[in-house]
Amino acid sequence: MKILITDKMAEEAIQLLKDAGHDVKFDEMDHDTLLKEIEKYDALMVRGRTKVVKEIVNAGSKGSLKVIGRAGIGVDNVDIETAGKLGIPVVNAPTGSTISVAELTITHMLSLSRNIAKADNTMKKGEWAKKQLRGSELYGKTLGLIGTGNIGKLTGKIAKCFGMKIIGFDPFISKEDMMKDGIEKREDLGNLISSSDFISLHLPHTPKTHYIVNKDMISKMKPSAYIINCSRGGTVDEEALFNALKNGKIAGAGIDVFEKEPPQNNPLLTLENVILTPHLGANTNEGQIRAGTICAEQIIKVLEGKEPDYCVNKKYLQ
C-alpha cells in the first residue's frame, strides 16, 4: 500500500514500512499540496510540523486513506475527531519519547538548582562568580508531578534516585496505582503546588488543562520553588509566570514548550532566573528512532487489518 510521510522521520521507521512491503514516499508537502495529494495514499505519517486539519482528513477519506500516524505522543496537530467519525484510526507512539523527556526534565532541575546556565555565561565572560552561584541539592526536596502518566512516572523514578520525595496530581490515576510507582497522590492541585520544591508538568494541552498553572496557582508556590514545563505550551500562564519570576515570587523556571513557538518577543526571554530550551523534549537520536518505529508498527498493524496498540481516537471511530 502507499504511505506518505510529510515530516522528517528516522530512517529506521521508513525502512520498517518498506520491509513490510509498502510503497513509501517522503515529501514535506505544504498544506495545499497535501490537500490535493492525500487521497492517493493509504496512510499518512507525520510528526509535529504537518497540520492534519479537518479538510485534509476529509480529502483523504474521499480517497484510500486508512490510517494517520503521529510519530510522537501529542496529537494536537491532527483532527482526531473528524478522522474517527470518518472511520480513520489515528495512531501514535506514546512511549517513544518517554525517556528523552524525563531526562530533559531532570536536566532542567539540575541546571536550575546549581545555576549552570549563569555559571557557564559568567565563565565565558572571564568572570569567576563562585560566591554568587551557591546552589542547592535535589536531595531531600519534594518534586510535585502534575500528570503521572508514562513520562511523569519515569521522571519521578529518576528523581527518587536523587533522594527526592515524589508527590503527584492526576485525576485519572488512582492513589493505589500512584503508590505502586512510589508517588504520593494529592487530590488538590493547590496542595501539591504549595508542598513542592520543584513542580513539573506532564500532561497534554486541552481545554481542561489550559492554564492549569495560572496566577492563583503560582501564588501558592514557595518563594524557593522552581517550575518545569516540558509538556505542552498553554498549560502554564506565561504572563503570570513572567511576573512571578521578575518580582522574585518564585526562584526560577525551566521551560521547553511555549504557547507560541518559536517564542518571539516573549518576555521570558529577558529573565536570568529561567532556563529556556527550544522544545527539545523528544529531540534525541534514540527518542526519534523509538517514536518513528513504534508509529510505523502501528500503521502496519492497521493496514494489515489488525488492532493497533495505540489508537487515540477509538471513541470516535464508527
Image: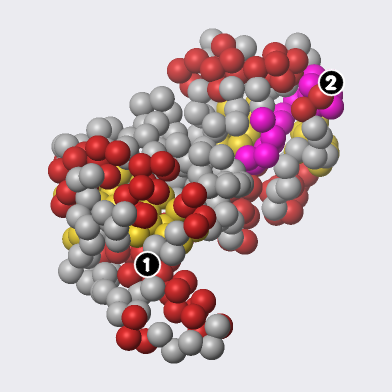
Q: Position of residue 106 (x, y in %)?
A: 38, 63
Q: Position of residue 69 (x, y in %)?
A: 63, 34
Residue 139 in view (yes/no): yes
Drawn side of residue 286 relative to residue 219, left or right: right
Query: Which SS class for mark 1?
Result: helix
Q: CA distance from mark 2 to mark 1?
A: 48 Å
Q: Which residues are magenta?
A: 33-51
Residue at the (49%, 49%) spot, across then down: 267
Q: Is residue 39 magenta?
A: yes
Viewer-closest of 13 and 125: 125
The reply to whether callout 2 and callout 1 are in contact (CB within 8 Å) is no
Question: Crowdedness of circle 1 by 10 Å Cα count: few (<14), some, many (20+)?
Answer: many
Residue at the (19%, 40%) spot, across then down: 190
Look at mark 2 in the image and give the residue it sits on.
36
Q: Is residue 6 magenta?
A: no
Look at mark 1 in the image and give the residue it sits on.
112
Viewer-closest of 126 and 19: 126
Note whether 59 is above or below 162 in the view shown. Answer: above
Q: Amino acid at mark 2?
A: Lys
Q: Quadrant of the N terminus?
A: top right
Q: Amino acid at mark 1?
A: Leu
